[in-house]
Image (cartoon, helix red, strand yellow):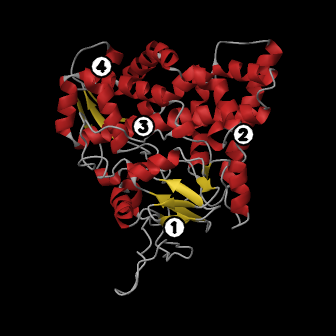
């Protein structure tokens, strides 16, 4: 589950580390690095390799310094932490705050026109005590027991979607058939969004509308009009459904009913209900969509690993953990800011600075993982950070893994052979460095 909060957009800039601080051989090394005026460049916009393969750049960042500095499109300075040990520690460090309203006020005092998504209030953009109150309302719905109880529902939706992809199933024949599909559009997106719709009690027929809102919110460009329109439309939509339920005294057993009950108890405001639905709706499908796409691509690139997995489908839970590490669906954790100076490996990040924790870089750190750029489905050195950590660890982690395990197991069983239906260099990636996912994945499925 990812965030419905916007963030400064570093994706149009190179993520190169600032040059190391140099000094004459006879000079003593500095006690603290304070790159308050880091050297930066104005690179070309949207380098084509950065979205398709960010890992060489992230590796250079890890190797060159414990902290790198860049400027967002709007000119906001961002400090990026790329090393596993530092990222893991920072995820639980209260000195890195996530209060989006305070963050927006801080950004407004620095530059104009940067939108951090303060219009949406939810637990991922809040710190205690608000975070504790908001998370308590929904956390029971994502317990291990409740998630396992969703297995039949996820399996049913998965098989229904696969039947739609499978010409043989449609003709009730066992003959060999071939179909060309866009796996993102036809399978990876509808599966988690339909699950979330059942969980929340939202109309599944509006799923393309939810996807439009999600894309506008998480991949916003410099013009924030689309973001603001999506937030407004989503808020009006959710509250209209809520009002209709109240008028009809309609209380089905779903999360929206739980949220409305919490409002009646004075535990949630209307804005918080909208924010919670936005987080669960957007976050509840974005991670799984991206993970399913990159996992299938990784299997196509690594036929030896695919053969290992096909030989024993019960290995799928272990494989999903490696897919999460290898190509983390959330590349950068939600933007934080420092509430006091923080030392990271001898580099001091001053107070009131914006910080990005690179989950993608951390999960490829050779100091933590052996041969980290290789997909190893039976990897023993586990412990990825794909779902974050600390109090803000992804609430829907168990559900996302369950969906992925069921979906990939069924997909591989139904279609023994899958091949790319395009050249790999023609694949299009989501235009954001916060998320890591494909826009489309054309496949030829052979049954």
Q: Could you say where residue 50 lies in the image, as x and y percent from the top left?
A: 40, 60
Q: Which residue is mark 2?
A: 233
Which SS class for mark 4?
helix
Classify mark 2: residues with Cα within 10 Å, few (<14), some (14-19) or many (20+): few
Cβ–Cβ under 8 Å for marks 1 and 2: no
Which SS class for mark 3?
helix
Discs 1/3, front: 1
Q: Which residue is mark 4?
A: 168
- Quadrant of the rendered image containing residue 290: top left
Classify mark 3: residues with Cα within 10 Å, few (<14), some (14-19) or many (20+): many
Which SS class for mark 2?
helix
- Marked residue nearer the N-terminal end (2 or 4): 4
Discs 2/4, front: 2
Q: Is residue 185 above or below residue 372?
A: above
- Marked residue nearer the N-terminal end (1 or 3): 1
- Quadrant of the rendered image containing residue 207: top right
Spatial separation of the CA atoms under disc 1 and disc 2 = 33 Å
Q: Which residue is mark 3?
A: 184
Which SS class for mark 1?
strand
Discs 1/4, front: 1
Q: Which residue is mark 1?
A: 70
- Marked residue nearer the N-terminal end (1 or 2): 1
Q: Residue at x 45, y 76 (%)?
A: 30
The numbered disc on residue 286 is: none
Classify mark 1: residues with Cα within 10 Å, few (<14), some (14-19) or many (20+): many
Spatial separation of the CA atoms under disc 1 and disc 3 = 32 Å
Cβ–Cβ under 8 Å for marks 2 and 3: no
Q: Is residue 61 above or below residue 154?
A: below
Spatial separation of the CA atoms under disc 2 and disc 4 = 40 Å
Cβ–Cβ under 8 Å for marks 3 and 4: no
């Amino acid at each position: 589950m990812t965030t419905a909060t916007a963030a400064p957009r570093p994706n149009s800039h190179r993520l190169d580390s600032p040059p190391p601080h140099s000094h004459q051989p006879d000079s003593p090394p500095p006690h603290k690095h304070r790159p308050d005026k880091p050297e930066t460049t104005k690179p070309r916009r949207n380098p084509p390799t950065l979205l398709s393969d960010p890992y060489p750049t992230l590796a250079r960042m890890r190797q060159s310094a414990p902290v790198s500095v860049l400027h967002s499109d709007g000119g906001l300075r961002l400090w990026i932490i790329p090393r596993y040990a530092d990222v893991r520690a920072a995820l639980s460090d209260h000195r890195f705050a996530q209060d989006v309203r305070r963050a927006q006020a801080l950004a407004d005092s620095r530059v104009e026109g940067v939108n951090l998504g303060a219009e949406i209030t939810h637990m991922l953009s809040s710190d205690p005590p608000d975070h504790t109150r908001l998370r308590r309302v929904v956390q029971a719905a994502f317990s291990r027991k409740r998630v396992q109880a969703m297995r039949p529902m996820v399996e049913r939706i998965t098989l229904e979607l696969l039947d739609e992809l499978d010409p043989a199933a449609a003709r009730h024949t066992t003959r060999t058939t071939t179909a060309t599909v866009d796996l993102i559009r036809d399978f990876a997106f509808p599966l988690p969004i339909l699950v979330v719709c059942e969980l929340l009690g939202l109309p599944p027929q509006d799923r393309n509308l939810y996807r439009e809102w999600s894309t506008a919110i998480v991949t916003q460009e410099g013009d924030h009009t689309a973001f603001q329109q999506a937030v407004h439309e989503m808020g009006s939509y959710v509250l209209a459904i809520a009002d209709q339920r109240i008028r009809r005294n309609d209380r089905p057993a779903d999360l929206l009913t739980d949220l409305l009950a919490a409002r009646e108890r004075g535990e949630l405001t209307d804005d918080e209900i909208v924010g919670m639905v936005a987080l669960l709706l957007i976050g509840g499908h974005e991670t799984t969509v991206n993970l399913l796409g990159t996992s299938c691509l990784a299997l196509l690139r690594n036929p030896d690993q695919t053969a290992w997995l096909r030989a024993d489908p019960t290995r799928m839970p272990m494989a999903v953990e490696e897919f999460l590490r290898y190509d983390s669906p959330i590349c950068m954790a939600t933007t934080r800011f420092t509430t006091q100076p923080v030392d990271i490996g001898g580099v001091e990040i001053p107070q009131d600075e914006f910080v990005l924790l690179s989950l993608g870089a951390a999960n490829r750190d050779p100091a933590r993982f052996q041969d980290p750029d290789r997909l190893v489905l039976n990897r023993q050195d586990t412990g990825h950070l794909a779902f974050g950590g600390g109090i803000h660890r992804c609430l829907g982690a168990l559900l996302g893994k369950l969906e992925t395990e069921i979906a990939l197991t069924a997909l591989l069983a139904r279609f023994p052979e899958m091949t790319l239906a395009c050249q790999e260099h023609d694949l299009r990636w989501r235009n954001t460095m916060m998320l890591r996912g494909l826009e489309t994945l054309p496949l030829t499925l052979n049954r």
